[in-house]
Image: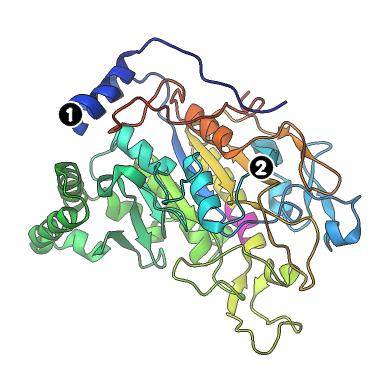
Amino acid sequence: MVCRESHQAHRLGRREALQIGVGMFGLNLPAMLRAAQQARPGRDISCIFLFLAGGPSQFETFDPKPDAPVEVRGLWKPIQTNVPGTHICEKLPLMAQRMDKVAVIRSWQGRSGSHAAGSQHVTSGFFPPAGGQYFPNFGCLVSALRGARIPGVPPHFGLPVAARYTNPPGFLGAAHKAFDIAGDPADPQIKVGDLNLTPARFEDRQTMLTQLENLSQLSNVEDAGLTAKDKFAGEAISMLTSGAMRRAMDLDAEPTALRERYGANIYGQRVLLARRLVEAGARFVTINQAVQGGLFGNGKTNGTWDNHGWLFDSMMSFGPRPAAVPSGSKWHSYNGPGNLPQLDMSLSTLLDDLEERGLLETTLVVAMGEFGRTPKINKTAGRDHYPSAGNLVLAGAGVRGGAVIGATDRKGAAPKTRPCRPEDVAATIYHALGLDHHRTYFPRLPRPTPIADGRVIEGVFG
């Protein structure tokens, strides 16, 4: 069963007419946002999207293949979870005890083995044209459609960026860029274009006018339209005059034991910060969640799951240099947990924390990369880019915990049942957020274009 369906003709409703009007007749964005808010029924759902940049291996995460040949199944064994009959990689022991909280999609399938094209496809739901990304990432579109929920808290954040390899706002332009929080969450900076806002500046009212003037000048450079200027100025005023953002970024307010459960490092603290931002009123937080280190991890975007070599060493830790790494290859050491234990700690704690705070039912959690990895382990004990098969997990916001959706063949090379694509994941995310993906259109386009071209994945929601 393929998780896709064709669009059906329908009559225009109030929201569609408003959004078409924005594109055709020039209605201003704030008016459209206010009307869209009034027209939107249902719960107000947030999303934390853990983008596992570089492409995690399905075999070493949520789709182990114990009966496959050793060159496919790898070194690690499956472990029984708290959902009878469901097994995941033994290196995810904390998540194994929380699988009743998540739905796993094992039959996910992309189109491109390119980091750029694959990432843009996954984070927007649209395959990018040859000229580059056109349609916006999920968080930027949510920002455009719904605006800020709480004064002083922007609707969309990137930690440290709103998905590596992507141009998050696409055609929406600078007005709907994410507010990126770069660096260590213990010493954060909010970044808008080339402008940085540190927590100290939130307290220094004497620099407020200078900051606003810089924001205005930045918007004029990056987007000649009034939309960007108005949005930057309005959000800057709110952010600088309220204490909401300063309080949200104060991780010292959290118990030490909880911070350690997330992971006493940059990567775990970003996930904790995402929870605090959602609690403060953010609608969408994208975490570029990958540990810095190894052969490919010394980039400006802070880390990668791109394990072409020595996968079984580097997924666990980037501290010691594997003996087999050639002497001429630069190894970037990081003395902390690798991507796999870091994901296990931070994701499991996030689910517990949201549930204990009563936020899990109003927060969608998504964890996925831009593609999976090759079934056959290569000559350097790694796996290469592989868009034909992968997996992802979803939780919260009505997701049916304990569900396992679809399956790959014995070697994990292709979906055996219910193949689902990025378009379907997009439709599923929008459904969880209360957006009808067939009847909600992109703003600012001259013709009505639905925000997703897929189908809500059957079985994800209870």
Element at badge 2?
loop
Q: Quadrant of residue 37?
A: top left
The residue drawn where x is 51% and y is 19% is 7
Relative depth, front residue between 187 and 219: 219
Determine if the magenta segment contains residue 364: no
| Residue 178: x %, y % from top left | 34, 50
Which region of the structure is painted magenta? 342-346
Residue 256 visible from this viewpoint? no
What amino acid is labelled 1 in the image? Gly
Q: Residue furthest bottom?
A: 327
What amino acid is labelled 2 in the image? Gln
Quadrant showing the C terminus? top right
The residue drawn where x is 43% and y is 31% is 451
Q: Which circle marks residue 109 in the picture?
A: 2
Left or right side of 120 for 422: right
- Magenta residues: mostly which secondary structure? helix
The residue carrying pointer 2 sits among few (fewer than 14), some (14 to 19) or many (20 or more) residues within 10 Å by Cα, namely many
Determine if the magenta segment contains residue 344: yes
Quadrant showing the N terminus? top right
Left or right side of 52 for 202: left
Q: Quadrant of residue 172?
A: top left
| Residue 168: x %, y % from top left | 39, 49
Residue contact at pointers 1 and 2, CB within 8 angstroms: no
Q: Residue furthest top?
A: 11
The residue carrying pointer 1 sits among few (fewer than 14), some (14 to 19) or many (20 or more) residues within 10 Å by Cα, namely few
Q: Quadrant of residue 340?
A: bottom right
Q: Which circle marks residue 339 in the picture?
A: none
Q: Which circle marks residue 26 in the picture?
A: 1
Q: Earlier in the sequence, mark 1 or mark 2?
A: 1
Relative depth, front residue between 220 and 343: 220
| Residue 318: x %, y % from top left | 63, 74
Element at badge 1?
loop
